[in-house]
Image: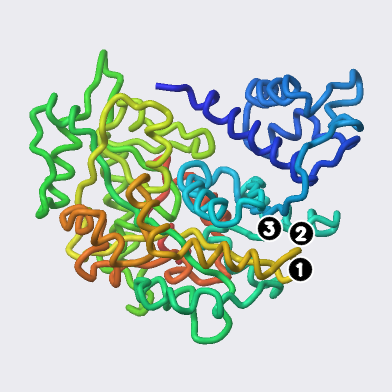
Amino acid sequence: MRRASDFLYVRLYKTLKEQILTGLIKPGEYLLPENELCKYYGLSRNSVRKALEELNKEGLVVKRVGLGTMVPADVSFQHGYRKTLRIVAPFPAYFVDNGLHVICDAFRQKYPHVDVHVLSFPADKFIESIRRSDRMGFCPDIVLIGESQLAVAEEQNVFVDLGPAVGGSLDGMYPKLRDSFCPNNAITAVPITFSPTCLVYNPELFAAAGVPLPGPHWTVDDFTSAAERVTSATDGRIDRFGFSLFPSLSRWLVVALQNGMRPDSGDNRPKIAKALDKLQDWLHRKRIATVYTESKNLINPFTYGKSAMTLTTLFEMSTWTERGIDFKPEIAPLPFGETKSTLMQANLLLVPSQCADPGLSSEFVRMALQVDVQRTMCESTNFLSVLEAVNDATRSEAYMHAINIGGGLIDNNYFLHELLDHQMDQTDLMAEMSLFWLGLEDPRTIAEHF
């Protein structure tokens, strides 16, 4: 399996290269210092230096002793008479790395005179970076964004109404997605792919422990039993867990949803406390689960064969093949409660009104929703289409039910912003939960924050 650092330095190299080629970093300008690049992109100094070395080999940067790394003043790019479409996206963004190319390829085929470049800004500073770039005179042509950042972006009120460009495609979109992002008035954000939070397992570890594989009617007791039997220890030290979890709201709240949490069901705190108590039971009483916190560096024990199950998304899973995991993960139906429900995430496109060619940018968004483009994406990647008929044609019925989408199950699912008060600071809430994940805070105390 490839090391996470090897995977990430290539992404930083591509990110900085696009920023240079598109003029965000101009000839004669300095890049951020190495220590700031480390902090900005959440990478090690070694990864940053390897990325800069690759840029240096291509003549895109030079190192000035005592000054830093700069783009040579005399660097030249051979573009000819061509247009450029500049897409900005968060870093990391799984869809950018493994799915967006399908849409870009289709667009280039129809518009061969247009160069499409994707630039990435750190996810936790994404909106701030766009604002700063605007002050520097750089306006992207398209913004790719996750639904968690959409509300902040739309506050700027500077995006094109995409209704005229995509209106005909909305009829085939899942009503849940259409109603969440494409209202009857101006449509400024269009979803192009989405993912539920789902449970995946390592069938090889199940088989080695003699544990039956998950079935359609798998229960929380079956899940707990499987995690207990797969967990193993050497000399009293656990060397493999049954379950691993990233402690973000987009993961563990699924347990509360499966136990009846709803945005319109009144007081959800008892249901949240019940879910947290179950998590604490697995983590600290039975010691069959663990949490991991390295999301940027993709250090999930599951991908290393150190846990048998994990909660994840299809977005995150798209990186696993490239990283070379040595087993084929399978998806299990969510077993945590009686309610068939999960969380969802989406990737959306927006067009800034001040971009160079709003018509061309809107055409890119329109093409992203074409049936043949969405079908190609589904057939060549593990991403889902926002068009229901495309998923039905490219995914099995059993698969769509396992991820809680098929057969109308998608209507039971929620985006995080539908569940939480818009004034709730998720970063502060995750910080408040730090002691809980260590087993030092009562679930009911945490539930009071909701």
Q: Which residue is nearer to you in this view: 49 or 441? A: 49
Q: Secondary structure at mark 2?
A: loop
The extreme top residue here reads 235
Check if mark 1's residue and mark 3's residue have beta carbons within 8 Å. Answer: no
Residue 398 can be seen, yes or no: yes
SS type, badge 1: loop
Residue holding disc 2:
139
Q: How is the image coloured?
A: rainbow
Q: Earlier in the sequence, mark 3 or mark 2?
A: 3
* Above or below for 246 versus 369: above
> Which residue is located at x 45 percent, y 66 percent?
450
Discs 2, 1 touching: Cβ within 8 Å: yes
Residue 127, disc: 3
Residue 419 placed where, x, y %? Answer: 42, 69
User: Is disc 1 surrounded by few (<14), some (14 to 19) or many (20+) residues within 10 Å?
Assistant: some
Residue found at x 18% / y 28% = 204
Q: Earlier in the sequence, mark 2 or mark 1?
A: 2
Q: CA distance from mark 2 to mark 1?
A: 7 Å
| Residue placed under numbered mark 1 in the picture | 354
> Is residue 348 toward the left or the right of residue 247 in the image?
right
Q: Give the Cα separation between the discs numbered 3 and 2.
A: 13 Å
